[in-house]
Image: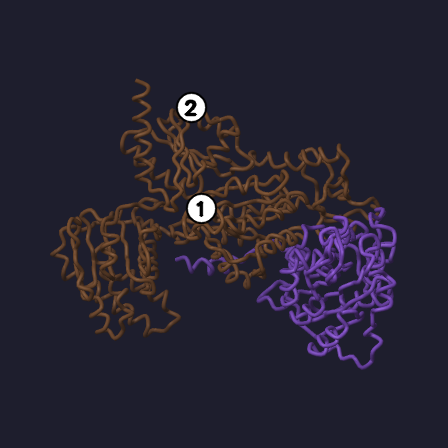
């Protein structure tokens, strides 16, 4: 496995260089993970992009960097400490200096000069990419091919210029290769058919495949990509994206569309979620399907819009006034993001209630590999109980909220003769008519609250990987579950029988499955990116948080690293053994 | 062909005897019959307040939403099924206080929705507080010394905000009101029909008698040019909006007809199918 990083000033094409490296590595058959680890110590114009590539799936960040491409001295100062014996590939134009004590080899190449010789300073990044290709032993042809695909629409000259720059960088590095103290020989990848995308992409693709044809949203980091992707894709399939005036409008328009029978969604983050709460109660009360994606970020208030956090869980489950049932599903990978992207619409229509897809910034924004076969079309579409026709002799008003054995009432879509009814946020009788009768009220509350419980027979709400009788089980959701999966591998390498558990449905809580799946574990560490331990609180509310449980919380905006989780877990096990003995 | 009876429900009214809202309901039902609407293909989105109860009394597909959000809900309904006749109905608080943001943006978005605002210049269901259209000096429970704020001028806002159809009716003048609602429904695009609907319980100032004396019927003025925003604004300014009739109209293309590639058939009936070639082409960007 190699960790490659490029750093420089914003506007120098750092992201696009990273994008090229990640796509080429993926096309070669390597698993990739690309991200920016925002850190409060990095100020001003500095930016960077990091790519991990290897022959096993990678779904998390890491502290370590093997190759650092530095386009300015600041990059060496800020990022150099991540190297332990690695190589800094720097542009000689800024006369790079290796700070004292840094364990790395500095290799300066005249990137700017070569770019100028090629006629454009903008080509410096391509030279850096070409040099990186040589350093990682990836070969130059795959880079040529990718550039031809990516810049093909810009004309043959642009492709040629980029390929020449790649070649110059590749050649320059090859000529200096004998001076390198460290070299990397990656295990050759098994050729595979994978794609590179973000969690937002996967959710949007899932929604599209799942028949979503209306997205009403308001731009907000880190959810906006979903809207931007759908607005690109919808014209070819007849859908519409509406940029609303606010999140109140976004959710309400989606609910109106759900009432009228379209598969509609909105996507937001913390502040938008707060604004949507009243309307989510409306959807729950009127039993109207709607799908909401919450890409969690640092809160409260504006909080930290570009930082990782998982602090909206309780707001998604319990937010708003009154007691309004909703389903909250929690993907932790691209595969699960795609699956939940379409399944959310099935759940919303089957259970006639709001469904949240709860993701987080790291899952939403960072690129990973995914097998093309996972992103399949068509996907199962189930629309739940819809009455399409009535007998001609029916004169009785339609009982939209009829009490049934499974608490789910058949609904009609506007346009169906004889199926007219009133959907109201006011408490109502089975007919839909307003009713405050005590007996009816209690039955309606029970109906709405109980109908979603059968979700657990439809999908596994909690998944486990690893031994049934584990020394330790790491529990999480979203991108933290992915961190835990890598942390468990590290623990296993240290001889600890580690397992990983992650929620696929957090509301309604998968009580029985969770209880049985965690039964055999000696220690259980709940890892969550918030300050109050919201998952742990939910487990406590179920009465399942016993003395085996502990929490590891992080709320500084920086994602967990697998190595840190593994280290904490090892300490936890060691300290508990001290107590025991 | 649906009759007046077809649009009625058996629900008993919660409105006070003499409430202007009865007139709005009656005119709306007459208008629905006149345009040839059917209950099954009519969707009424109602807001919160006395006015919001209107959905209880009309047989159609109705959704009674949160306070101030009738217009986004109506947009969602319209986009989900373009074949439906979509009406949003609410009061002056719903439209011009809590829902003002949606009001302004719905004007410029111009989806084919008919918006009927039942304007009584007071908050009735909460038992008598100042509304955004209350006149300065109006005494209520929340303005015991008289309102110190200037009232909203919804018609001028609508004309200036890009509306393509702006009208005002009076619940007592049934033929004109029903006619305005018909014309609003027949208009391609967003239509605002602000209806003076007196509150007999909490507003003794803006009474039926007061309106009958002050309102000027623009439809009876052959010199009035309803195709000019500037002249509409001038007339509204001169009359302090105390007019009835069609104030402004321009031919327009509704929002849903401008969305690139948008299905002409209802999304609600779409099977979600995507051709395999289209799907494969879409995935190329991730290769």
Looking at the picture, does residue A19 appear above or below residue A371?
A: below
Q: Is residue A515 left or right of A257 when viewed as pictured?
A: left
Q: Visible in this render: residue B241?
A: yes
Q: Is residue A225 left or right of B230 when viewed as pictured?
A: left
Residue at 71 percent of width and 52 percent of height: B142
Nearer to me, B277 or A362:
A362
The label nearer to you, 2 versus 1, is 2
Q: Mark 1 highlights which residue?
A: A335
Image coordinates of residue A515 in percent, x first then y, are 48, 27
Image coordinates of residue A356 in percent, x first then y, are 54, 45
Q: Which chain is home to disc 2?
A: A
Q: CA distance from mark 2 to mark 1?
A: 34 Å
Specify the colour of chain B: purple
Q: Mark 2 highlights which residue?
A: A547
Q: Residue furthest top?
A: A581
Q: Which chain is home to disc 1?
A: A
Looking at the picture, does residue A577 appear above or below residue B189?
A: above
Image coordinates of residue A206 in percent, x first then y, are 51, 51
Tag 2's secondary structure?
Answer: loop
Chain brown in the figure, letter = A
Image coordinates of residue A156 in percent, x first then y, are 34, 73
Query: How did the renderer colour the structure?
Result: by chain
**Do the residues under discs 2 and 1 have CB atoms within 8 angstroms?**
no
């Amino acid at each position: 496995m190699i960790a490659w990083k490029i750093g420089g000033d914003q506007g120098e094409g750092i992201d696009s260089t990273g994008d090229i490296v990640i796509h080429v590595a993926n096309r070669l058959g390597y698993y990739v993970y690309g991200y920016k680890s925002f850190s409060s110590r990095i100020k001003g114009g500095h930016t960077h992009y990091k790519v991990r590539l290897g022959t096993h799936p990678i779904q998390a960040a890491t502290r370590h960097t093997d190759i650092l491409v530095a386009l300015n001295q600041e990059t060496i100062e800020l990022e150099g400490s991540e190297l332990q014996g690695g190589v800094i590939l720097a542009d000689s134009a800024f006369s790079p200096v290796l700070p004292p004590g840094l364990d790395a080899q500095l290799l300066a190449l005249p990137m700017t000069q070569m770019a100028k010789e090629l006629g454009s300073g903008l080509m410096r990044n391509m030279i850096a990419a070409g040099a990186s290709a040589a350093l990682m032993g990836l070969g130059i042809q795959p880079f040529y091919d990718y550039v031809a695909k990516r810049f093909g629409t810009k004309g043959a000259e642009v492709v040629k210029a980029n390929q020449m720059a790649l070649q110059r960088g590749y050649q320059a590095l090859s000529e200096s290769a004998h001076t390198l103290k460290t070299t990397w020989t990656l295990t050759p990848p098994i050729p595979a058919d994978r794609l590179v995308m973000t969690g937002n992409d996967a959710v949007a693709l899932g929604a599209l495949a799942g028949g979503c044809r209306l997205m009403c949203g308001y731009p907000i980091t880190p959810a906006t990509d979903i809207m931007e992707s759908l607005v690109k894709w919808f014209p070819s399939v007849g859908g519409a994206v509406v940029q609303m005036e606010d999140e109140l409008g976004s959710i309400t328009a989606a609910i109106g569309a759900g009432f009228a029978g379209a598969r509609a969604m909105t996507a937001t983050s913390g502040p938008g979620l707060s604004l949507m709460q009243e309307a989510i109660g409306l959807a729950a009360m009127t039993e109207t399907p709607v799908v909401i994606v919450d890409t969690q970020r640092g809160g409260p208030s504006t909080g930290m819009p570009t930082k990782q956090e998982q602090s909206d869980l309780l707001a998604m489950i319990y937010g708003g006034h009154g007691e309004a049932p909703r389903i909250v599903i929690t993907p932790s990978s691209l595969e699960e993001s795609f699956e939940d992207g379409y399944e959310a619409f099935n759940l919303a229509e089957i259970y006639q209630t709001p469904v949240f897809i709860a993701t987080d910034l790291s899952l939403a924004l960072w690129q990973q590999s995914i097998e093309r076969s996972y992103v399949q079309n068509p996907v199962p579409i189930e629309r739940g109980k819809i009455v399409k026709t009535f007998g001609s002799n029916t004169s009785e008003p339609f009982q939209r909220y009829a009490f049934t054995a499974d608490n789910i009432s058949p609904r009609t879509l506007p346009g169906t003769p004889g199926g007219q009814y009133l959907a109201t946020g006011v408490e109502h009788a089975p007919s839909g008519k307003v009713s405050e009768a005590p007996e009816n009220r209690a039955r309606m509350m029970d109906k709405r609250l109980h109908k979603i419980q059968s979700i657990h027979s439809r999908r596994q709400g909690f998944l486990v990987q690893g031994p049934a009788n584990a020394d330790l089980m790491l529990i999480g959701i979203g991108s933290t579950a992915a961190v835990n999966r890598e942390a468990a591998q590290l623990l296993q390498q240290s001889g600890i029988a580690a397992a990983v558990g992650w929620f696929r449905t957090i509301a309604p809580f998968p009580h029985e499955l969770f209880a049985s799946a965690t039964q055999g574990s000696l220690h259980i560490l709940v890892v969550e990116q918030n300050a109050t331990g919201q998952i742990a609180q939910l487990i406590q509310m179920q009465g399942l948080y016993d003395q085996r449980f502990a929490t590891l919380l992080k709320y500084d905006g920086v994602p967990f690293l697998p190595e840190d989780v593994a280290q904490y877990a090892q300490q936890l096990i060691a300290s508990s053994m001290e107590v025991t003995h | 062909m649906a009759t007046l009876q077809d649009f009625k429900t058996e629900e008993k009214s919660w409105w006070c005897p003499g409430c202007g809202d009865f007139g709005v309901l009656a005119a709306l039902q007459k208008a629905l019959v006149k345009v040839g609407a059917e209950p099954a293909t009519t969707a009424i989105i109602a807001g919160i307040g006395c006015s919001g109860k209107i959905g209880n009394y009309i047989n159609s597909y109705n959704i009674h939403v949160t306070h101030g959000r009738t217009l986004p809900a109506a947009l969602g309904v319209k986009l989900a099924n373009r074949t439906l006749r979509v009406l949003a109905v609410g009061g002056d608080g719903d439209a011009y206080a809590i829902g003002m943001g949606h009001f302004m943006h719905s004007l410029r978005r111009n989806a084919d929705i008919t918006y009927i605002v039942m304007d009584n210049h007071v908050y009735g269901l909460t038992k008598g507080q100042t509304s955004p259209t209350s006149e300065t000096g109006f005494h209520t429970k929340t303005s015991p010394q008289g309102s110190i704020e200037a009232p909203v001028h919804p018609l001028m806002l609508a004309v200036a905000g890009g509306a393509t159809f702006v009208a005002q009716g009076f619940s007592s003048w049934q033929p004109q009101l029903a006619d305005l609602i018909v014309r609003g429904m027949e208009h391609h695009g967003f239509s605002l029909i602000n209806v003076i609907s007196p509150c007999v319980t909490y507003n003794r100032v803006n009474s039926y008698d007061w309106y009958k004396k002050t309102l000027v019927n623009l439809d009876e003025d052959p010199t009035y040019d309803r195709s000019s925003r500037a002249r509409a604004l001038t007339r509204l300014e001169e009359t302090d909006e105390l007019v009835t009739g069609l104030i402004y109209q321009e031919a327009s293309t509704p929002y849903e007809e401008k969305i690139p590639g948008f299905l002409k058939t209802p999304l609600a009936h779409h099977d979600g199918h995507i051709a395999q070639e289209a799907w494969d082409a879409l995935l190329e960007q991730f290769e």
